Amino acid sequence: MESLSKNLWNYKFSHIYVEKDALNYDISHDIISRFKKSILIEIEHYKDVFCRKNQNFILQKKIPKLILAVKKDNFIYPGSKMCDDFGNDNFYYTSLVMNCIYDCEYCYLQGMYPSGNIVIFVNIEDTIEKVKQILKNKSIYLCVSYDTDLMAIENITGFLHKWIETANKYKNLKIEIRTKSADFEYIKDIQSLDNVILAWTLSPDKIIKEFEKNTPSLNKRLKSICDAIDKGWKVRICFDPILYVKDWEVLYKQCIEKTFEIIGKRKVYQVSSGVFRISKDYLKIMNKLREDSKILAYPFQCNNGVCSYNTKHINKMMNFIKNEVKKYVPLKDIYLQ
Amino acid sequence: MVYFLTALYYEAKEIIKHYKMKKVIEAKKFQIFKNDKYYLIITGTGGIKAAVGATYLLSNFGYNENDIFINIGICGANKEKAHIGEIFLCNKLINKYTKKSYYPDMLFSHSFREGSLESFLEIVDKDMIKNVKADIVDQEGAFLYEAVSIFLKPENIYIIKIVSDFLEADSVTPVLIENLMASNLPKVYEWIDKRLNIEDYKNDIMNKEENDMINILCKNMKLSSAMEYEFKKLSKQYKIRNGQILDLLIKYKDVKCNIKAEGKKVYGELKQKLMEL
Ligand code: SF4
């Protein structure tokens, strides 16, 4: 009798679900060919898998499946009020990948999506086309790595290459690529552009270990940042979210010190920071999913559907961060949420 | 709890024996067997009977949303796609008539073959082979899955099929079914045992001592029900953040308030502390 595996969990991307239509795109075949051991399952619509009832988000995050789909509408969305537009007009974001290979305990995606599986919309060209139409009439500031971490999966999708190529052709398009990855090397072959900002989210190592599962260490992220700046890229550093945890002052002070010690004399484009904040509806779902989460177990205050710490704590934390960061970066380049 | 569903008695016989199940006398509409951890229902052939049987079983025997449901039985297959005695764990279930497909969540590894199952209302014979899209066919799987997924999680519903014939229903005798089940079920039992080791139970956050202390304080501080609700929530959050809460609560153990206003004041002070790290 064939012996059963001692480890009963499947492996990451053990199954790839593909919409029939998605099979008409070369990129789908490229992606499938990278996962030779995965079982391929043809589906009609990504929602048949992604939106099933009663799914276990937390378990799915451990061993996510991949879903390849074709985006039919909603190619571009107006920017969220919970995110800074950094003074840019016409703030939009795209969501070509739903969900993330990382597993941060505070991530809003767990409140937003019914599934922890990852959907890749393979028809990026349609979104780019939509963006080009808008660019005929106005400049836009576009966050392309929302609801996911595109740099962390660039080796699978190649989407950043396509976005940066578009930004190279359209100077009235400003792009933000937000990441926690240490994978700058996936785009190191590309010439840096003035209208593309690489935004790295940094956290203290203790927070990374405890609450940002699967993400690279602070040192590794900093190494990627240094490489990017050295190659001429504009890098925004985001200390966000700042979490109200035991010894937060010590942890974030050390993190900020270490960041600027390693970056040294390199020029940082901007620094942004904000405390943990989340939509009330998402928080409700997250509290059910992670009943014992230390960071979610806080008496949050809700205003206009957004929950965060109480004003006393927010002010204390933001002042602290501002005072620490301004030792290294001029105040005009510091953005606080 | 683990729930088995089979269409036929011959599919169930070996399972009943293996788990030493006893007949549930109170069950009047279907034959149901059980021991302390497993239930088994025999529904008869067909999607409607299977869906009704599953609903009857889950509704009448107090299911829990983390329970496991296993439909096990024989199936037909296209000669090119499978061999007799092959065990399939289905990853896609197609309802032949609505054309809708269902996807159990394949979180756990196994040694079976994975494939798609198409469920028909009638027996599928060789002449219908052109109409078959999936690897294997039966008369229950997809219908049953749709019903069970209303109650249970998609990672806990397993449709396991053993190939009995190449769309030649006449060749399927009770003896053949019993033999197929007897020779293949040990692999299924072994997998179920391992699967059951991964339980997703969460422990209660507050223990009895803490709950008792909270109840004493509520009484002593004469808290209203709204304040009591808030106090319990804040206490639980404090315990999660700090790993313990008794050290703080114990300081208020001997406080006895005679009027509500007095209690409100004490509670206000305690509340501030509960909101800090
Ligand atoms: S990196 Fe961002 S998107 Fe990914 S899990 Fe963490 S918070 Fe969510």
Image (tube, grey):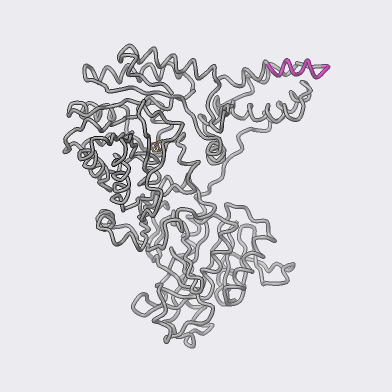
Q: Quadrant of residue B144?
A: bottom right
- Does residue B167 sit above or below B225 in this rendering? below
Q: Quadrant of residue A265?
A: top left
Q: Determine the residue positioned at 17% across, 38% down.
A: A190
Q: Residue at x 43, y 55 (%)?
A: B108
Q: Magenta-highlighted stretch: main secondary structure?
A: helix
In-image side of B185 versus A188 (left or right): right
Q: Position of residue B102 (x, y in %)?
A: 48, 63
With respect to residue B156, does B184 lie above or below? below
Please check the rendered image and state whether residue A267 is part of the magenta-colored stretch, yes or no: no
Q: Examine the structure image and report whether residue B261 is included in the region drawn in magenta.
A: yes
- The one nearer the camera, B86 or A227, is A227
Give the image location of residue A184, x and y in percent: 24, 35
Residue displayed at 58% across by 77% down: B45
What is the span of residues highlighted in magenta in the rendered image? B258-268
Image quadrant, ligand 1: top left
Q: Position of residue A238 (x, y in %)?
A: 35, 26
Q: Residue A142 appears at what percent x and percent y?
A: 33, 37
Position of A191 with respect to B235 (left or right) is left
The residue lying toward the viewer, choosing from B85 and B242, is B242
Classify residue B227 as left or right of residue B105.
right
Q: Quadrant of residue A194?
A: top left
Quarter of the N terminus of chain B within the rendering: bottom right
The quadrant of the image that shows the C terminus of chain B is top right
Q: Could you tell me which residue is drawn at 71 percent across and 27 percent down?
A: B214
